[in-house]
Image (cartoon, rainbow, N blue to C red):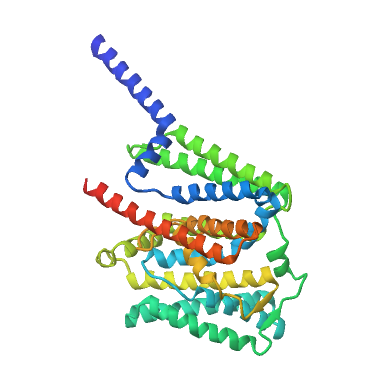
C-alpha cells in the first residue's frame, strides 16, 4: 500500500472515530428526537403531565410533595395499579374487560369468607381467589373464541354476575373485617422497605440496564451490525440510578417505600420483560395490530386471547386481595365506584393504545400515579370529588387524543 493510501485510510479511521464519538455523546438525544418526530411519543406525554400536576399541587399545598404524603400515595396506587396491569394485557390485543372491579371485589370477599369465617389459611384463601380470577378469564376467552361474543358484552355481563356473587357471599352483614395485626393487613397498611435495602434496590435497574446494554453492543458488533453507543448506555444508567436513589432518599425521610408498591413494581418489570422480550409478548402485539396477519404468520390467536383475558382477571383478583388488606375489610363497596374506570383510565393515560397492538406494562405504573396524584392533590385542597372526576376525565380524553394523533403521525411517516 502506498504512503498516500495509508494516510487516506488513517484519515478515514480518525473520521469514523470522531463520528462515533459524536454519536456517543448525542445518541440518546438524537434518537429521542427522531422517535418524537415519527409519532413514537412513548411515555413523554404522561411524564410531562405528571410534572405539571405535581408542580401545581405542590405550589398550592406544599404538603402534597411531602415524603409522608407521597408514601401514602404509593400505598393507594398499588391496588388499582395492579388491576390496571391486567387491563394493559387485554388492550394490547384490542379488547376490553369491564368486570375487573367486580372481580376484585369478589376476590376480597372470597378471602374474607374463607380466611375469617371458614378458618382457611390465608395463603390458601388468596390462592383460591386467584384461581377464581383465572376461571372467569377462561370463561371470557371461551365466549370470545368459540362463540364470537364481543368482549364488551361478555365482560359487562360478568360485571353484573360477579357483583351479584360478591353480594351473596357477604350476606346480610355486608362486610367482613380482617384481623388487625395480621401479616396481610400489615403488608397493606404499614410495611415499608428497610432504608439500606431501599438504597440497594434503587441500584438494581441501572446495573441491569448497564449489563444488558453492553451485552447487546457485543452481540450486535459480533454480527457486524450497528450498535448503540457505550456513552449513551452509561448516561442512561447513571441518570436512572441517580433519580431512583434520590427517590429512595426522599421517601426514607419519613415512612419509606411501601412493600406493596415494591410488589407492584416487580410485577410491572416482569410483565414488561414478558411483553417485550418473549415470543408471547411479540405475539400479543401482532394479534392486537392485525389479527388476520398474525394468524397467517402461524400465531395461535385463540391462545393469545385466552392468555390476555386470564391474566387480566387474575391481576384483578390480586388487586382486590391487596385492596382488602389496605382497608382491613371486605365489603359490598369493594370493587365498585370508580375502580373499573380508574383501572382502564390508568392504562390508557399511561400510553397503552385503545386500538390494540401497542402498549407497555409501565403504562399502568405511570397512569395510576397520575390518577392517584390528582385524587390526593384535590383531597388535600379540600375540593369535591366531582372536580376529581372532571379532571380525570379531561386527562383521559387528552391521552386518547394524543394517541390518535401519534397513530396518524406514525402512519404518515411510514408512507413517507
Query: Does the image show residue 262?
Result: no
Question: Residue visible at 74% across and 50% down?
Answer: 254
Q: Position of residue 379 (x, y in %)?
A: 64, 60
Above or below 144: residue 296: above
Looking at this rendering, what residue extends furthest in the right direction?
A: 181
Looking at this rendering, what residue extends furthest in the top direction?
A: 3
Could you say which is closer to the camera, residue 349 or residue 7?
349
Residue 190 left/right relative to 75:
right
Q: How many marks?
A: 0
Above or below 331: residue 393: above
Q: Quadrant of residue 244?
A: top right
Above or below 172: residue 214: above
Question: Residue visible at 69% across and 78% down?
Answer: 121
Could you say which is closer to the camera, residue 255 or residue 402?
402
Residue 412 left/right relative to 204:
left
Query: Does the image show residue 31?
Result: yes
Q: Position of residue 28 (x, y in %)?
A: 43, 37
The quadrant of the picture occupied by the N terminus is top left
The quadrant of the picture occupied by the C terminus is top left
Above or below 332: residue 345: above
Q: Position of residue 230 (x, y in %)?
A: 45, 33
Could you say which is closer to the camera, residue 206 or residue 339?
339
Residue 355 left/right relative to 381:
left
Residue 63 left/right relative to 133:
right
Question: Residue visible at 34% across and 80% down?
Answer: 149
Q: Position of residue 367 (x, y in %)?
A: 51, 57
Amino acid at each position: 500500500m502506498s504512503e498516500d493510501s495509508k494516510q487516506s485510510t488513517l484519515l478515514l479511521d480518525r473520521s469514523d472515530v470522531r463520528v462515533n464519538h459524536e454519536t456517543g455523546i448525542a445518541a440518546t438525544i438524537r434518537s429521542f428526537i427522531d422517535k418524537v418526530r415519527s409519532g413514537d411519543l412513548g411515555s413523554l406525554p404522561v411524564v410531562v403531565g405528571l410534572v405539571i400536576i405535581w408542580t401545581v399541587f405542590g405550589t398550592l399545598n406544599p404538603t402534597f410533595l411531602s415524603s409522608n404524603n407521597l408514601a401514602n400515595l404509593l400505598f393507594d396506587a398499588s391496588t388499582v395499579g395492579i388491576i390496571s396491569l391486567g387491563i394493559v394485557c387485554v388492550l394490547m390485543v384490542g379488547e376490553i374487560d369491564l368486570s375487573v372491579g367486580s372481580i376484585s371485589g369478589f376476590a376480597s370477599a372470597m378471602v374474607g369468607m374463607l380466611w375469617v369465617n371458614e378458618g382457611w389459611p390465608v395463603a390458601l384463601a388468596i390462592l383460591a381467589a386467584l384461581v377464581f380470577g383465572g376461571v372467569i378469564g377462561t370463561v371470557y376467552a371461551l365466549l370470545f373464541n368459540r362463540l364470537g361474543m364481543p368482549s364488551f358484552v361478555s365482560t359487562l355481563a360478568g360485571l353484573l354476575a360477579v357483583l351479584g356473587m360478591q353480594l351473596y357471599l357477604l350476606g346480610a352483614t355486608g362486610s367482613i373485617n380482617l384481623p388487625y395485626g395480621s401479616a396481610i393487613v400489615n403488608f397493606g397498611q404499614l410495611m415499608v422497605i428497610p432504608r439500606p435495602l431501599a438504597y440497594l434496590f434503587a441500584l438494581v435497574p441501572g446495573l441491569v440496564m448497564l449489563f444488558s446494554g453492553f451485552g447487546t453492543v457485543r452481540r450486535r458488533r459480533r454480527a457486524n451490525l450497528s450498535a448503540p453507543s457505550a456513552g449513551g448506555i452509561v448516561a442512561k444508567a447513571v441518570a436512572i440510578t441517580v433519580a431512583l436513589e434520590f427517590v429512595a432518599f426522599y421517601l426514607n425521610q419519613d415512612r419509606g417505600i411501601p412493600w406493596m408498591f415494591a410488589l407492584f413494581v416487580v410485577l410491572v418489570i416482569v410483565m414488561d420483560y414478558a411483553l417485550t422480550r418473549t415470543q408471547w409478548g411479540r405475539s400479543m402485539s401482532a394479534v392486537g395490530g392485525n389479527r388476520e396477519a398474525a394468524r397467517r404468520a402461524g400465531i395461535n390467536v385463540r391462545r393469545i386471547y385466552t392468555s390476555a383475558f386470564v391474566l387480566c382477571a387474575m391481576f384483578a383478583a390480586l388487586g382486590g386481595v391487596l385492596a382488602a388488606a389496605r382497608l382491613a375489610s371486605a365489603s359490598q363497596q369493594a370493587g365498585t365506584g370508580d375502580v373499573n374506570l380508574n383501572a382502564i383510565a390508568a392504562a390508557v393515560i399511561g400510553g397503552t393504545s385503545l386500538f390494540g397492538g401497542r402498549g407497555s406494562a409501565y403504562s399502568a405504573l405511570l397512569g395510576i400515579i397520575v390518577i392517584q396524584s390528582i385524587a390526593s392533590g384535590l383531597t388535600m385542597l379540600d375540593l369535591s370529588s366531582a372536580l376529581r372526576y372532571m379532571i380525570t376525565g379531561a386527562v383521559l380524553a387528552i391521552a386518547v387524543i394524543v394517541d390518535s394523533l401519534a397513530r396518524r403521525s406514525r402512519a404518515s411517516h411510514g408512507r413517507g
